[in-house]
Amino acid sequence: MSGDQRHAIRDSRKSRILGTMAGWLMRIWSSTLRYEIVDRHGICRTEHLGQPMVFALWHNRLFMVPMAWRKLTKGRRQVVVLTSASHDGSALAHAMQVFGISAVRGSSSRRAVAALVGLKRALQQGLDVCLTPDGPRGPKYHLQAGAMKLAQSAGVPIIPVHVQPSACWRLKSWDSFIIPVPFSHVRVIFDEALAVEPGLSDDAFEAERVRIESILRAGAADPFSESTP
């Protein structure tokens, strides 16, 4: 198999259909949830609406965020997400379309440079970018450097997003993917903005990576997020 074939974006009729069906299931399921949305930075305040941002959340909390985004922004901000170049990434991209969210295809293992260019272009166009920095394969709760490098190169802030369901099921996946129990309470916190300064040394960059990772881990460790039915 040639390099072009190995790194091609995968798509199929099956992934489009399954992804769209999954998106509508997520939307219907999420409509039963009682959302509490905390916007610490004020991302929808007038002075921030023209500022693109990089939103970062753990992969296992993805299910609950699209509806929270719709409820908070009410169309005042537009976001793109990064999905892998695989068939699974295709399905996720089509699921996000149900919520009016576009996708850039690629990952650390496939089409990484093309994905980075696409994400940076989106930021330059005034769109937000949402990343799961421990995805698509982990390790769980490990902040990979991509989100920070993107924010640093584009000169935009990172907004950590904490998602805390009052009751949930955890799948037997690498990240213990979380499915909230219908009609449960879900707290979604859009945290204060974090800047990744340009010109950091390797040691300073790593220290900042550890700091941001600890902020995201603290949001995941909230006891409210660990309860199960």
Image (cartoon, helix red, strand yellow):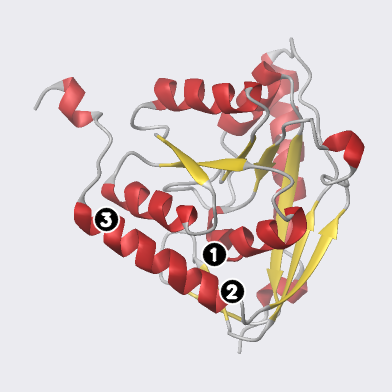
Taking the spot 54% from the left edge, 58% from the top edge, the residue there is 99
Alpha-carbon span between mark 3 and mark 1: 18 Å
Specify whether residue 16 is in view.
yes
CB of mark 2 within 8 Å of CB of mark 1? yes
The residue located at (47%, 48%) in the rendering is 138
Pointer 1: what residue? 63
What amino acid type should be assigned to the residue bearing mark 3? Ser
Compared with 228, 46 (above or below) is above
Secondary structure beneath dot 1 equals helix
Q: Quadrant of the N terminus?
A: top left
- Which residue is disc 2 drawn over? 30
For marks 2 and 1 on the same chain, the one whose residue lies earlier in the sequence: 2
Q: Residue at left 36%, top 32%?
A: 109
Q: Which residue is drawn at 28% across and 35% down?
A: 9
Q: Which of 203 and 192 is in front in this view?
A: 192
| Residue 220 visible, this angle | no
Q: Nearer the viewer, mark 3 or mark 1?
A: 3
Q: In this view, does 119 lie to the left or right of 196?
A: left
| 190 versus 188 height, above or below | above
Residue that extends furthest to the bottom in the rendered view of this protein = 229
Disc 2 to disc 1, C-alpha distance: 8 Å
The residue that mark 3 highlights is 15
Label ID, residue 88: none
Q: In the displayed structure, would residue 101 be above or below residue 107?
A: below
Placement of 156 over or under 22, stated as above or below: above
User: Badge 3: how crowded within 10 Å, few (<14), some, or many (20+)?
Assistant: many
Q: What residue type is labelled 1?
A: Phe
The first of marks 2 and 3 along the sequence is 3
Corner quadrant of residue 192:
top right
Residue 131, given in percent of the width and then of the height, sits at: 57, 42
Kindly give the residue lying farthest to the left in the view shown.
1
How busy is the neighbourhood of tag 1: few (under 14 within 10 Å), some, or many (20 plus)?
some
